Image (cartoon, helix red, strand yellow):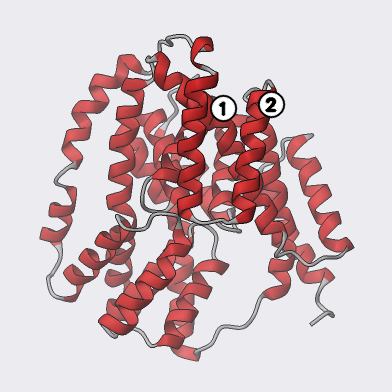
């Protein structure tokens, strides 16, 4: 189920997602699922799960890699560029504004009350995503068992090695449990594969073009530093924190320790991926040009790898063996999503306000299929009102 969409529609859809996806990478993935799978039905549920599985095993920002996957499936390489730029743009612009305020007045004011409202709504978004993906994926005891095992593993230890271990072991389980049930499938997008593969070759020299266009010096250094980190960031954005701290604080001295902590905090209070903190660091070093170069560096290499691996996945999808592996991985990915909801829920205030926001948000998302932005933003306002006198 893959409908060709207009480039304007793709840009505007991801722009709205990027402006409202507060709460971390799974909130962003959930928003993408809500728009393109549940509401518009332009990407199939199984294909969405396949994209999340692949993104979870590759370096870089998992959510942005999923966005690249969806853009590629709907509009090829132009769709990748449009989707990624649109989803990053709101948080990038907000970071630039906050960076200017920060440079003038120093420490940012706390907005803790707003985020107390965001958190239960984000949990509801993630739970609704798991529910929507599970309805047609988990159809028997084997899938339930794999899903529960994934939830248990991630709640015992939520790190990259455990995540990859769950995905790999689930793939082996699928090979054993589901091989006789899988059939060769003819994918609707195969007819366009040759077009995409020929276009894919044109993206190989992109980093060289970017580097050649830079003025040299610190901009080249910024791009190379963040581009190299992009391919080492296995496990999502939070792995970024100790790695980048060592490089930009200790290695290059671009930021003080306090400025680095504030950069991470600003990345967390903006919508979209936490790796947008790279824009703040780049801005501190070389203004708007530095922010742009650092942002391109932290996202571009892993996106290119994601697109390449997506093409390989398309070629393999007709294989019975590969289908059985995916049949085992899909319920595990749903388990990972549920585990993410549990982990996020632990950070919410334990009171009736959180429960009320969660229940109302979940009802709106599942029963009325309300857009995520319409759920998340009022929840933040509700948090501001409810907790105003609590601090």
- Residue 155 in view here: yes
Task: Sort mark 1 into few (<14), some (14-19) or many (20+) by Cα contacts within 10 Å.
Answer: many
Picture residue at 34% right of the left edge, 77% below the top: 246
Q: Secondary structure at mark 2?
A: loop
Left or right of 49? Residue 76 is: left
* Quadrant in the picture for the C terminus: bottom right
Q: Position of residue 303 (x, y in %)?
A: 33, 46
- Marks 2 and 1, how far apart in space? 9 Å
Write down the quadrant of residue 83 in the picture.
top left
2 and 1 marks in contact (CB < 8 Å): yes
* Dot placed on the residue nearer the N-terminal end, 2 or 1: 1
Which residue reaches farthest bottom?
A: 105
Q: Quadrant of residue 219?
A: bottom left
**Residue beneath disc 2:** 135
What residue lies at 55% left-to-right and 20% top-to-bottom?
A: 177
Residue 48 visible from this viewpoint:
no
Residues 279 and 57: in front is 57
| Residue on which the image places disc 1 | 45
User: Going 34% across and 55% down the picture, which residue do you hit?
Assistant: 299
Residue 159 pos. (x, y %): 51, 56
Residue sitting nearer the eye, 99 or 297: 297
Image height check: is 284 above or below 12? below
Q: Position of residue 230 (x, y in %)?
A: 31, 58
In the image, residue 152 lies at what x, y percent? 65, 46
């Amino acid at each position: 189920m893959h409908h060709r969409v207009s480039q304007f529609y793709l840009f505007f859809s991801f722009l709205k997602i990027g402006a409202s996806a507060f709460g971390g990478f799974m909130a962003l993935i959930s928003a993408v699922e809500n728009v393109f799978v549940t509401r518009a039905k332009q990407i199939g549920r199984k294909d969405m799960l396949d994209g999340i599985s692949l993104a979870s095993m590759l370096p870089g920002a998992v959510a942005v890699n999923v966005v690249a996957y969806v853009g590629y499936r709907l509009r090829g390489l132009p769709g990748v560029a449009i989707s990624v730029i649109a989803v990053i743009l709101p948080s990038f612009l907000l970071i630039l504004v906050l960076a200017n305020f920060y440079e003038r007045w120093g420490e940012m004011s706390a907005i803790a009350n707003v985020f107390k409202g965001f958190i239960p709504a984000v949990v509801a978004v993630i739970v609704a995503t798991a529910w929507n993906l599970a309805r047609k994926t988990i159809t028997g005891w084997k899938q339930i068992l794999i899903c529960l095992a994934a939830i248990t593993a991630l709640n015992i230890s939520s790190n990259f090695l455990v995540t990859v271990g769950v995905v790999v072991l689930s793939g082996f389980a699928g090979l054993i449990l589901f091989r006789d049930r899988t059939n060769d499938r003819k994918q609707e997008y195969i007819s366009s594969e040759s077009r995409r593969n020929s276009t894919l070759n044109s993206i190989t020299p992109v980093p060289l073009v970017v580097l050649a266009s830079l003025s040299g010096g610190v901009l080249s250094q910024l791009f190379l530093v963040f581009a190299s980190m992009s391919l080492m960031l296995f496990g999502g954005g939070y792995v970024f924190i100790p790695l980048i701290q060592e490089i930009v604080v200790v290695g290059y001295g671009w930021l003080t320790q306090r400025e680095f902590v504030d950069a991470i905090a600003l990345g967390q209070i903006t919508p979209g991926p936490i790796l947008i903190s790279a824009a703040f660091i780049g801005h501190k070093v070389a203004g708007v040009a530095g922010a742009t170069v650092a942002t391109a560096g932290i996202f571009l290499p892993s996106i290119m790898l994601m697109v390449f691996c997506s093409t390989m996945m398309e070629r393999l999808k007709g294989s019975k063996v590969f289908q059985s592996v995916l049949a085992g991985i899909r319920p595990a990915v749903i388990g990972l999503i549920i585990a993410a909801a549990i982990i996020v829920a632990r950070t919410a205030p334990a009171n009736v306000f959180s429960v009320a926001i969660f229940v109302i948000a979940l009802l709106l998302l599942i029963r009325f299929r309300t857009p995520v932005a319409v759920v998340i933003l009022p929840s933040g306002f509700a948090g501001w009102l409810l907790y105003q006198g609590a601090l």
